[in-house]
Amino acid sequence: MFDQLVNADAELFLYLNNLGSEGWDPFWLMVTDKLYSIPLYALLLFLIYKYRGVQTLLVSIVVIVLMITFTDQFTNLIKHTVERTRPCRTEGVMEYMRFVAERCGRFGFFSGHSSNSMAAAIFSGLLLKPYYKNLIYFLIAWSMLLAYSRIYVGVHYPLDIICGMSFGVLTGYGFYKLCLYILKRRNISTF
């Protein structure tokens, strides 16, 4: 059964990856590059400051740093424990795929891009929900777009992405709750 799942994952990867074309490659390389997300993160921090104040912003920054560090390090721990090679390094897959990324890391399960972006989306979407009710849906869609870019450029299988996003949801929610707890303990208004 496990082999069937892995084979289905590889087949789905090849299907999705091969939907790409050279004309779209620059767009997806931009989406997958973490630097292009900086303006969005800066806007989210500004909105936290604008609606929640400087104290909440400072607590949020500390919690976000802890969240991204935790998510990133846990992802690396899982990658080096599971040791599932990336599609761009897997014989029987790499010969049939489009490799667009600039480099191909060693292990890919599960996706750090997916977990980090989804954690940030859930955390900031929940924190700003009283002011922007539908923002969380936009942020989840943005995170899913970023996650798909990892398949497009050839460095992650769909299960890497799904597991990464799922972990990101849990992490984002958990650190959101931690942020609220800290704000309450410091007698800073949470809403």
Image (cartoon, helix red, strand yellow):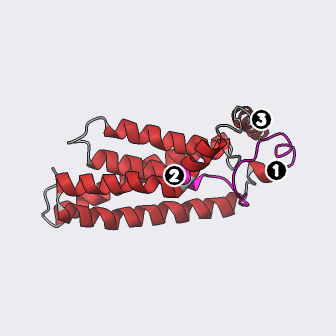
Q: Amino acid at mark 3?
A: Gln
Task: Look at 52% across and 56% down and name the residue there.
Answer: 34
Task: Look at 78% across and 37% down and name the residue there.
Answer: 7
Q: Position of residue 41 (x, y in %)?
A: 38, 55
Considering every residue shown, the one lying at the far front of the view is 23
Task: Look at 52% across and 45% down and name the residue there.
Answer: 165
Q: Quadrant of the N terminus?
A: top right
> Local crowd at mark 2 within 10 Å, few (<14), some, or many (≥20)?
many
Sequence-earlier tag: 3 or 2: 3
Q: Amino acid at mark 2?
A: Ser
Magenta residue span? 90-115
Which disc number belongs to residue 164?
Answer: none
Residue 113 colored magenta? yes
Left or right placement of residue 121 versus residue 159 in this view: left
Q: Amino acid at mark 1?
A: Thr
Sequence-earlier tag: 3 or 1: 3
Task: Look at 65% across and 59% down and name the residue there.
Answer: 79
Q: Position of residue 18 (x, y in %)?
A: 74, 34
Task: Decide: is 114 above or below 104.
Answer: above
Q: Secondary structure at mark 1?
A: loop
Q: Dots 1 and 2: beta carbons under 8 Å? A: no
Q: Which residue is mark 2?
A: 115
Q: Which residue is mark 1?
A: 90
Q: Dots 3 and 1: beta carbons under 8 Å? A: no
Q: CA distance from mark 1 to mark 2?
A: 22 Å
Nearest the camera: 102 or 124?
A: 102
Q: Secondary structure at mark 2?
A: helix
Residue 32 visible here: yes
Which disc number belongs to residue 4?
Answer: 3
